[in-house]
Image (cartoon, helix red, strand yellow):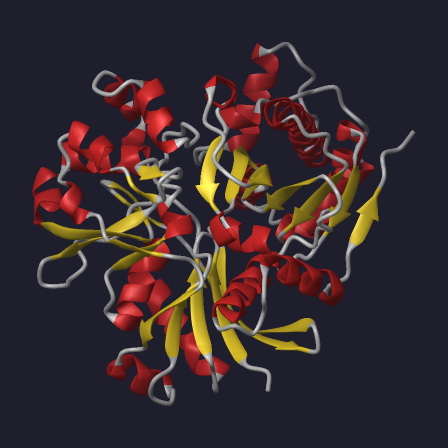
Amino acid sequence: MSRNYLALDLGAESGRAVLARIDRGRIELNEVHRFANTPVQLPDGLYWDALRLFHEICEGIRAAGNLHGIGIDTWGVDFGLIAEDGGLLGNPRHYRDRRTRGVPEEVFRIISRDEIFRRTGVQFMEINSLYQLCALRRDSPQLVGLASRLLFMPDLFNYFLTGKLASEATIASTSQFYDPVNRCFSAEILHGLDVDARILPELRETGTELGPVLPKITEGCGLKQGIKVNTTASHDTASAVAAVPARMTEEWCYISSGTWSLMGVEADKPIINEASLRANFTNEAGIGGTIRFLKNIPGMWLIQECKRAWAREGRDYSYADLMERAAAASTTETRIDVEQFTTPGNLPERICDYCRKTEQEVPADTGAMCRAILESLAARYRDVLDALESITRRKIEVIHIVGGGSRNKLLNQLTADATGRHVVAGPTEATAAGNALVQALGAGEIGSLKDMREIARRSFHLDEFVPKT
């Protein structure tokens, strides 16, 4: 008999509760609840509205009805602190908060960049949990002193549901104080920075049972007693990669396309060497002991932030409208360094300033601006592909684009053209599908990661793009 799994998938812009059923070698998804994820700007910084998000999680559980299991995935790096009495110490900060500006350089004066990479294999970005924790210790040492445990965002919501203080491996591996070789936290990194490593939670493997939903939550959500919460691949990219519909006989890479574009390959073990350090790649935990060897690239965030800026001016375009304008715009030679635009602000104005400073053609209108962003993303994918092939010594044949960004046919075609590779786009619901499939794997309903990918390939419509000659 098939079982119902609830995938609670929280992204940087929105969250949803998706009910999944696996039957006859296919997975069926039904979205039962969707909600906005709107950060809150306070005078002292940018925060996630964690309590509102948990309320919406409970609404999603209530809407789902009869369940076999629940799994939560979210974005990476952000965390909350839990006091000795079990209470939440303040709201979790948003990774785009400015408090981490310059913090990596402060850390490197204590522990070298090379040493951090040797121990963690993680890409250097100011948003990483390591630098957030160091900034918090600098600005609010009393808060860190009160902390009994640090929980990453999906772990925090799992704690609210079950009372279990634990962390799942895929989300822990985004922190830059996790050792992907030994699959444990690197307490030495925190000790070197005078942070008490006792705040690190117990690590749980992916696809295991965490515990039952607490009685008060069970009653409030109208559940029957004993519904279990599972440690799915709780980093959203890990869940998305689990549902990549790749054939095991092909050489492939993936782009998990959304607010960020996560581009990489699945490896058997971490790739931690001078080449991966120089190229600033990351090694994060995947399903079944695999490693997600990838590069974080600012993705549709640039379009999202431009859209917000235009809306503030009274020009409230839909995404479909912006993509139509981009498709109608002429091909451009303007190339934007997308890594320079990761913080909130008036992005159209900043991009125009960048183009003037770099002596490139300034986009003349919204269509030209969106076209320049998409072509710059495709060019960046080409550069990352070249680095991937060089470091892994693989010749990539197929690029699988999954996630919400896989609906962007213009970007998919530009990617095929820029890389000269066959592009397969879909499923758009890869993260929710992967979340549920990992739960089913843990429950014994699916036998292997290969089986998961075959199910994904049979279950979803896939679009294919070939390079234009």
> Toward which corner of the image does residue 197 lie, by quadrant?
top left
Taking the spot 14% from the left edge, 46% from the top edge, the residue there is 198
**Quarter of the image holding residue 187?**
top left
- Quarter holding the C terminus? top right
Name above or below for residue 281 compared with residue 30. Answer: above
> Relative to residue 162, is residue 28 drawn left or right?
right
User: Residue at 23% of width from left, 69% of height from top?
Assistant: 163
Q: Residue 95: image x %, image y %?
A: 36, 41
Q: Residue placed farthest to the right in the image?
A: 469
Residue 22 in view in this figure: yes
The location of residue 425, given as percent across then percent down, is 73, 49
Instruction: Using the image, determine if residue 219 lies above or below residue 389.
Output: below
Asked whether, in this view, residue 397 is left or right of residue 380, the answer is: right
Q: Nearer the viewer, residue 218 or 328?
A: 218
**Quadrant of the snapshot with the N terminus:** bottom right
Residue 115 located left or right of residue 76: left
Residue drawn 27% across and 59% down? 166
